[in-house]
Image (tube, rainbow, N blue to C red):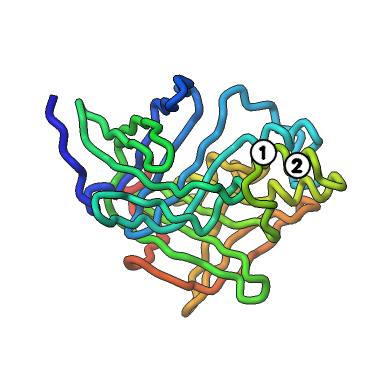
Amino acid sequence: MSTAEPSFESLTGLWRRSLILWPDGRRDETTWVNWLQGPGLYLDLRQPEHRPDFSHAASLSDLAPGDLDWLARQEGFAGELIYEDGWFEWRRDIDFQPEAIYSDRGRLWLEDGMMVEQGADIPYIEHWHREPVTARPAWAMRLRDRATGQKAALIRLGHLFMYARDRAAAPPPRLHLRDCVAGAATLDAARALVDCEISQGTVTSAGWIVQRSTLPFREGKPLAPLLGQSTLATADIDAGGRATVRHWEIADLHGRPVFDAAPNEELS
């Protein structure tokens, strides 16, 4: 069996997880996990199986307590990938779950046509598989709302994009989000705790369309990014179900932003 450490540059692309194995013997092969690595920045979305029907929910205000409990089981994060002394670290600017006690740091190696990750603080094992994605255009940006301090991130790789937008107020650290939601004082407070968007979608001639999201009412809707001189506007849906626009300041940019869908980049 031959193994080799991947180069930092070779990680750019879309990776699908097929397995996580914990030190106590627990394993998960059913959670849907995609990691999009762009230039410098990454985005990661993880959704458990047996997703409920959310067709009744057109906005945050339509989410019932049972909906919130399942949504709070999701995971996802965005930030910068760092490589130091043989360790890769996924530093988190945005995290769907409350701040964890452990770092997200591990070793990577290529083995039998897949990539293996072993955690540093907790020696879990994950299996990753590269998915076919067009390599260009490739760019990533960090975003910030100057008025509220909220953070966001956007990565494009070929026809694929991932977008993350932080919640307005951070939940208590070192808890699971399900516990935070269950202990919220009001239903609106519980809804605010899950109001952290991590979405994946495709870029086509019809627009930037969200396909998967931590917020189910965003699916099938446009992101509609609009570039200004040093700003970006994105489409959103407010708590009442009305279309709205968020305005961001570009805090960090990797690559040259391209927003149109060239014919050879679209999905067939």
Amino acid under disc 1: Ala
| Image point (47%, 50%), residue name | 162
Judged from this view, the residue extending furthest toward the right is 186
Q: Which of 173 and 260 is in front in this view?
A: 173
Residue 119 shows which numbered tag?
none
Look at 19% across and 42% down and name the residue there.
5
Q: Is mark 1 on a helix, strand or loop?
A: loop
Provide the residue designation for mark 2: 181
Quarter holding the C terminus is: top left
Question: The N terminus lies in which quarter of the figure?
Answer: top left
Residue plotted at (77% across, 53% down): 239
In the image, residue 147 above or below residue 169 = below
**Is 84 rendered above or below residue 66?**
below
Instruction: Pick whichever, 76 or 137, lies toward us.
Output: 76
The part of the image, by quadrant, that contains residue 66 is top right
Residue 259 drawn at (x, y percent)? 42, 61
Residue appearing at x 68%, y 26% in the figure: 52
Q: Which amino acid does label 2 sit on?
A: Val
Crowd band around label 2 with a 10 angstrom C-alpha radius: few (<14), some (14–19), many (20+): many
Instruction: Determine whether label 1 and label 2 are within 8 Å by CB.
Output: yes
Q: Where is residue 140 shown, x and y percent of the image?
A: 39, 61
Q: Which of marks 1 and 2 is nearer the N terminus?
A: 1
Local SS, label 2: helix
Left or right: residue 103 versus residue 169 is left
Number of disc labels: 2
Task: Inspect this view and state whether residue 203 appears.
Answer: no
Q: Mark 1 points at which residue?
A: 72
